[in-house]
Amino acid sequence: MGTKLDITCIQSMNLFNRITGIKSQFCFIYASSLIFVVSPENFDAAIGDRGNNLRRLSIAFKKRIKIVSTPTPDKINRFVKAVVSPVRFNKLTVENEEVSIKAGPQAKASLIGRNHVNLDQLQDILKYYFKTKLLRIV
């Protein structure tokens, strides 16, 4: 993931816009889920009445879909929780552009993923949104 959008991401964002009527600011993949980032004021409308838009998106993409609101630097903990859910971690700390996530053994394995795929994806996401340099799972 970088700052450039690839063609599949642009197509996904266009389909998201057609289904929800809300413009997505960005999309990315984490742990085989497609995650769309929308502004906080459009969050409820993007999910739809009783999650209707979320179900329609899931059927259209044939993937698990998550919708998160645009992160702010002071809400990194909330953003990471939304991205990695349903995995739960104990504590998240940020020091000098380094993010440390403390988690139990099961959660740690899920956060790292097979061949470090989830760890690399999460590190790229945090690097893009929060300008962090290093992610550690403890």
Image (cartoon, rainbow, N blue to C red):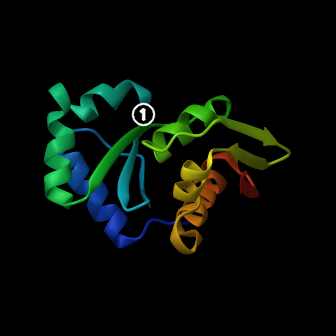
Q: Position of residue 120 (x, y in %)?
A: 60, 66
Q: Residue at x 52, y 71 (%)?
A: 114
- Residue ID for mark 1: 39
Quick check: 9 above or below 68? below
Q: Looking at this view, is 53 or 82 the one in front?
A: 82
The count of marks equals 1
Residue at the farthest right position:
96
Residue at the farthest bottom position:
115
Q: Looking at this view, is 125 or 112 the one in front?
A: 112
Indicate the quadrant where residue 102 lies.
Answer: top right
The amino acid at mark 1 is Ser
Residue at the farthest front position:
105
Q: Relative to 18, is 30 on the left or the right?
A: right
* Element under disc 1: loop
Quick check: 60 above or below 5? above
Q: Position of residue 108 (x, y in %)?
A: 60, 53
Q: Residue at x 59, y 69 (%)?
A: 116
Quick check: 69 above or below 34? above
Q: Residue at x 19, y 49 (%)?
A: 57
Q: Position of residue 7 (x, y in %)?
A: 35, 71
Q: Residue at x 64, y 44 (%)?
A: 103
Q: Relative to 16, is 72 on the left or the right?
A: right
Quick check: 32 above or below 87? below
